[in-house]
Image (tube, rainbow, N blue to C red):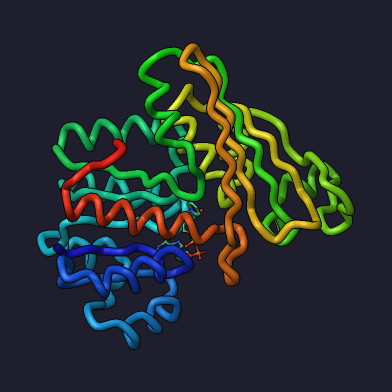
Amino acid sequence: MRLLIIGCGSIGTTLAKAVDEMPEVDLIYITDKSKVCAAHLVEKLHKVKYVDNSDECLSDIINDIDLVVEAASQEAARHFVPFFLERGVDVMMMSVGAFADDDFREKCFKLSKEKGCRLFVPSGAITGTDGLRSASAGEIDEVTLITTKGPKSLRSIEYFKQKGIDIERIKEPTVVFEGSARDAARIFPRNMNIAATLSLLGIGFDRTKVKIVCDPNVERNTHTLIVKGPFGEITSTTSNVPFPRNPSTSYLAALSAIAALKRIINNVWIGV
Ligand SMILES: NC(=O)c1ccc[n+]([C@@H]2O[C@H](COP(=O)([O-])OP(=O)(O)OC[C@H]3O[C@@H](n4cnc5c(N)ncnc54)[C@H](O)[C@@H]3O)[C@@H](O)[C@H]2O)c1
């Protein structure tokens, strides 16, 4: 198998290192809008080859790749996901918040169907998605996500400036956002991918509720998923260790990409 990883940050680096050890993968193309971010991987890993992220250079390797993993940004997802689906290549997408845009999502889903290629969205930094997926085969009354993060993970967000919320001055757990998953994904594009994943699995972006709590006393990003319906109730809490270089991303998100890739390679689907 041959992969292309777009984005050599926290997730892309962790994935590339894991894939380098997988005997089923013989070549890993990597690209990043910053060549410097990719350089350390080219130096350290055995199967890695750098490719420029221009459409022209990526088109040149299209017949040489089986799967593209987007681990860059919503902006990158908006460009590259349809770019590769149109060309019939399977795509794994991490910046799932981009799917809050209905037109973009429908375009990608349609392309995937028409071109017969698969679009994978790993569970990311949240647990309980298996139960939510099963519940969605019947009725669901409520899906709520309560996310608690420290100030480091919520820094430099324009919305807080506009609302006059000074994250650095918060001294006790404080609700800093309450609204729909659609608004959460739009306002916090780097923080709320999981709200998008839950919306896609369950009752959509407008009915999925999100509450964000800023707690100055926590180092971890904690997500509690609550699902209620005729099936019963799910409560699932995930206490995530953030990446040191990017505290808005949790280590579990990178592990979910590695786990998804292993399932794709082995073609055995347990707990689907
Ligand atoms: N699904 C989930 O649960 C989940 C969890 C965490 C992060 N994410 C998302 O996954 C993506 C990657 O996260 P990360 O923590 O590894 O980010 P990061 O900031 O650590 O790294 C992103 C890398 O992508 C590169 N990049 C950005 N835009 C690019 C473009 N247009 N073309 C090529 N390279 C580009 C950057 O230069 C950087 O090196 C982000 O969009 C993040 O929001 C999803």
Q: Is residue 168 above or below residue 238?
A: below
Q: Nearer the viewer, residue 114 or 125?
A: 125
Q: Is residue 219 above or below residue 127?
A: below
The reply, left or right, for residue 121 in relation to residue 58 is right
Quadrant in the rendering for residue 120 = top left
Q: Is residue 31 among the parts visible in the rendering?
A: yes
Which residue sits at x=22%, y=78%? 47
Q: Nearer the viewer, residue 175 or 155?
A: 175
Q: Give x and y (percent) for residue 228.
A: 55, 20
Q: Is residue 206 among the parts visible in the rendering?
A: no
Q: Give x and y (percent) for residue 134.
A: 37, 25
The reply, left or right, for residue 96 in relation to residue 259 is right
Which residue sits at x=31%, y=51%? 260
Question: How many badges with numbers are in the image?
Answer: 0
Which residue sits at x=49%, y=11%? 230
Q: Give x and y (percent) for residue 201.
A: 42, 30
Farthest residue to the left: give it. Answer: 63
Quadrant (top left, top right, bottom left, bottom right) of the C terminus? top left
Quadrant in the rendering for residue 195 = top right
Quadrant (top left, top right, bottom left, bottom right) of the N terminus? bottom left
Q: Nearer the viewer, residue 187 or 22?
A: 22
Which residue sits at x=39%, y=66%? 12
Q: Give x and y (percent) for residue 54.
A: 30, 65
Quadrant in the rendering for residue 19 = bottom left
The reply, left or right, for residue 9 in relation to residue 247 is left
